[in-house]
Image (cartoon, rainbow, N blue to C red):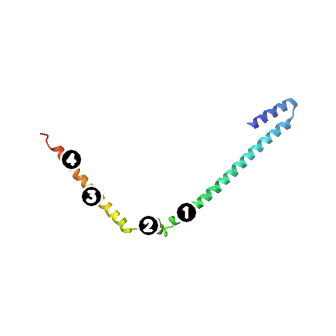
């Protein structure tokens, strides 16, 4: 907005006094402002790119063990292994969940048969 004011003031000065130099100075000042704005934008973009690189490096370092196929099994055992110290309880949990997983569909089928037989009975 300041550049528009400068232009109009320069045009008024030119009209009043016939000075072309004021108009040229106003145009140069406007170009300088645009150049400084572009320089600031470029500087901010460079800073943002540097921050992105630093974040990417941190993430890559944190995930290096997980991405490496040779170390994946060790990482899994290290991360999960600390939660299942009595191993036999974990194995019993897996076995019981498999049994219940097979048992519930059978009970569901029996329950559906009972419901359909109750619907078929005549109401006397």
CA distance separating discs 3 and 4:
19 Å
Question: As drawn, is 80 to the left or to the right of 47?
Answer: left
N-term-proximal mark, 1 vs 3 = 1
N-term-proximal mark, 3 vs 4 = 3
Viewer-side label of 2, 4: 2
Question: As drawn, is 114 to the left or to the right of 48?
Answer: left
CA distance separating discs 2 and 3:
29 Å
Asked if marks 2 and 3 touch (Cβ < 8 Å), the reply is: no
Label of residue 115 in the image: 4
Kindly state the secondary structure of the residue where label 3 is placed.
helix
CA distance separating discs 1 and 4:
56 Å
Q: Quadrant of the C terminus?
A: top left
Label of residue 62 in the image: 1
- What residue sits 33% from the left and 65% below the top? 92
Q: Which residue is mark 2?
A: 81
118 up-or-down from 62: above or below: above
CA distance separating discs 1 and 2:
19 Å
Task: Check disc 3: other Cα within 10 Å, few if <14, some if 14-19, many if 20+.
Answer: few
State the residue in front, 4 or 62.
62
Viewer-side label of 2, 3: 2
N-term-proximal mark, 1 vs 2 = 1
Asked if marks 1 and 2 touch (Cβ < 8 Å), the reply is: no
- What residue sits 85% from the left and 36% below the top? 20
């Amino acid at each position: 907005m300041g550049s528009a004011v400068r232009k109009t003031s320069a045009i008024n000065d030119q009209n009043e006094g016939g000075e072309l130099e004021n108009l040229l100075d106003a145009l140069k000042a406007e170009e300088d402002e645009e150049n400084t704005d572009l320089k600031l934008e470029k500087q901010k973009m460079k800073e943002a790119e540097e921050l992105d690189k630093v974040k990417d490096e941190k993430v890559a370092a944190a995930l290096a063990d997980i991405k490496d196929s040779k170390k994946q099994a060790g990482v899994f055992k290290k991360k999960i292994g600390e939660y299942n110290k009595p191993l036999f309880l974990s194995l019993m949990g897996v076995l019981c969940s498999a049994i219940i997983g097979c048992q519930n569909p059978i009970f569901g089928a029996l329950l559906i048969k009972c419901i359909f037989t109750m619907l078929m009975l005549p109401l006397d």
